[in-house]
Image: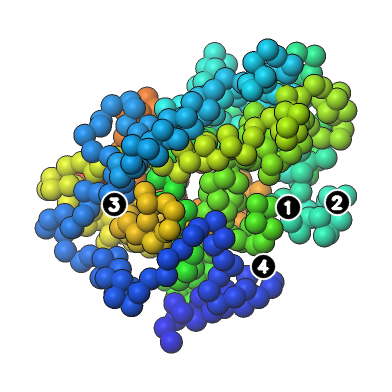
Amino acid sequence: MTMRHVGLLSFFLTAAGSPVFADGWGEPHLDIVPRTQVEAERISNATASTDTFETAEKFETHPAGKATKFGIKTKDAFSFASANMTFERELDFKVGNGFFRKLWVTAPASTVSSDGLGPLFNARACQRCHIKDGRGHPPEDHSDTGVSMFLRVSIPKSFSDLDDETLKYLANAPEPTYGTQLQDKSIAGIPAEGRMEISYETVSVTMGDGSTVDLRKPTYTFTDVAYGDLHPQTQLSPRVTPQMIGLGLLEAIPEADILALADPDDADGDGISGKANRVWSGEFDQWMLGRFGLKAGAPTIKAQSAGAFSGDLGLSTSLHPAGWGECTGAQSDCRLAPDGSSPTDQLEVSDEVLDLVTFYSRNLAVPARRDLDDPQVLRGKELFYQTGCVSCHQPKFVTHRLENQPEQSFQLIWPYSDMLLHDMGEGLADNRPEWEATGREWRTAPLWGIGLTQTVSGHTNFLHDGRARSLLEAILWHGGEAEPARETVRQMSAEDRDALITYLESL
């Protein structure tokens, strides 16, 4: 048995202080066709790590397999359907897109199917945060009204008045007055919770060649609070919206393949201790592998979408049926405000609408790679591997063969993420746990499409709070398990650094 497998066995026996089955927690969200032995051998060969960098690998042009979208390098590059989608299924994608872009209004309204916004909210539409289905950014100043960032909030579970059995099934303990998310907008007659303030301190990093790179270190506060002071133990976590491409393919990666990469106790001694997040699914009433969100706090796209409807827009779904959204018991007027619940199902977002938005989110295509055979790109790829970036940014997986999801079924994909949690050091820590994730841990961000951020989103802000203004700044913020890789990049020649960045921009 290899040390990697010893680490995996230890994880199965000790994660969250309770045993888990040797094959994980289960994948009830997928209708899986088991792999044959022949398929397993093909997959092993296809996903093996390369050790030659003279030319691009076979199928590297197709980061999403047959779902890859070719020929689009415009600001709409993240907004196309999976390329292997049939004409009939594309209708559902377009209807889902319509609901994703829909502007919701306050209840009651004449547009019955569009009311129910709030009472507290961060945006009026999904698209208002996920602009062009791309990456969000922090506000540049008070005049920047582009909504794509908010603050998560909680208190340590040890300070909560909730009982232990309730806390067991919560990602973290809500702040008693403000809940788990701070909303800076509200309907008429109900005060918004407050306003996020960001200040930056400059931190200079000296590179190996003597040049310097200025990083900006943010500090966050929540001001103009409308419902009293925050709890003295409040934990704030800033979040910018991530890009939406390839989510369905990430959802279809076999749980076992992700867990096989986990090494929470660093049994192999390589300094990398990836850990799976174990989260409770209200959708399936069981523990599942966390896949989505910046700390892998949601198990499925549907769960992530329903959480956003509730927290971001104040809209009820069957997974979050409260018509008042995030209003807490301490916000009594907020809970008494009119909602837009349908007399049919007592929900503001029906299961049909939630399923359509989920289908849309599942099928946003990953754009094709660019300039794969450029010598500088190939040199950058070699450096990416040599530096150890692939220890976390796992290049390849093959998705499950699925009965009813042809777009995601049995695809060789290149997300450049192991889908695991890693300690990224004190510099990036938000000091706010989420399920099994500590305040220093973040899920490895998929890198596919990252080179089109400027084209789609009009900026180059990266990391969980958008503090990095370039890919190099993002790398230089890496700490913790990624400290050795970061130091290698810092000591590189300018020529090699440029090649590494050029490679990342080709993804």
* Amino acid type of the residue that numbered disc 2 sits on in the rendered structure: Leu
Q: Which residue is mark 3?
A: 65
Is 395 left or right of 235, judged from the image as shown?
Answer: left
* Amino acid type of the residue that numbered disc 4 sits on in the rendered structure: Ala
Mark-to-mark CA distance, 4 and 2: 20 Å
Q: Which mark is residue 170?
A: 1
Q: Is residue 463 visible?
A: no
| Mark 2 or 3, closer to the camera | 3
From this view, report whether residue 193 is shown above or below residue 52. Answer: above
| Mark 4 or 1, closer to the camera | 1
Is 48 left or right of 244, judged from the image as shown?
Answer: left
Q: Which residue is mark 2?
A: 162
Picture colour scheme = rainbow
Mark nearer the N terminus (3 vs 1): 3
**Residue sitting nearer the eye, 47 or 103:** 103
From this view, report whether residue 465 is shown above or below residue 167. Answer: above
The residue that appears at 73% across and 18% down in the rendered structure is 107
* Residue 179 drawn at (x, y percent): 76, 38
Quadrant the N terminus occupies: bottom left
Q: Which mark is residue 16?
A: 4
The residue that appears at 40% across and 39% down in the rendered structure is 89
From this view, report whether residue 450 is shown above or below residue 487. Answer: above
Mark-to-mark CA distance, 4 and 3: 35 Å
Mark nearer the N terminus (2 vs 1): 2
How many numbered discs, if any?
Answer: 4
* Residue 198 drawn at (x, y percent): 59, 28
Mark-to-mark CA distance, 3 and 1: 36 Å
The residue that appears at 42% across and 59% down in the rendered structure is 402
Q: Secondary structure at mark 3?
A: helix
* Amino acid type of the residue that numbered disc 1 sits on in the rendered structure: Leu
